[in-house]
Image (cartoon, rainbow, N blue to C red):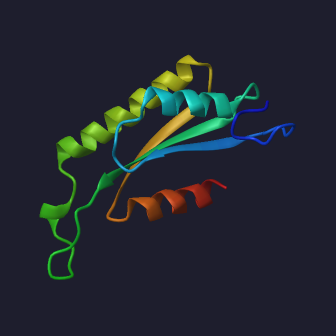
Amino acid sequence: MSTALAPTGVELRVECLLLASEGRPFTDAAIELAAELAGPEHAFVHVLSIARVHGTAFGLPNPGLLPTRSEWADQREQVAAAVKKLKRRGLKADGKVLGSRKAAAQISDHAVKLG
């Protein structure tokens, strides 16, 4: 499979793909690109969203700064919707929601764990 992301004449083979967000909803374009990158071999797609932890109070964790139940639920719904759209395309996918103050670092760490 060659895509616009791969140089001309180079075949891009993906076995595992991470579709991640720092809390924003997954767009149809992002899901379409993930499906395209998964290719005819149907790479496994991991969907990850970060529920924002808003910091610390006086250097200590504070429950008032953690995501609320509705924020967790919103993130889980977004991930479930993305997984459902990917599965409708015949792809294997799973999803996860993590909480973090540093979304980019958490996404990067998760990508390293997935290999």
Quarter of the image with the N terminus is: top right
* Residue located at (75% from left, 41% from top): 6
Residue 112 visible in rendering: yes
* Residue located at (45% from left, 30% from top): 82
**Quarter of image, res 2:** top right
Left or right, 12 with reference to 61: right
**Quarter of image, res 11:** top right
Taking depth in this image into account, of 107 and 70 the one nearest to the observer is 107
Left or right, 79 with reference to 59: right
Q: Residue furthest left?
A: 64
Residue 92 visible in rendering: no
Left or right, 80 with reference to 69: right
Quarter of the image with the C terminus is: bottom right
Whole-percent x and y of residue 87? 55, 23
Taking depth in this image into account, of 95 and 5 the one nearest to the observer is 5
* Residue located at (21% from left, 82% from top): 59
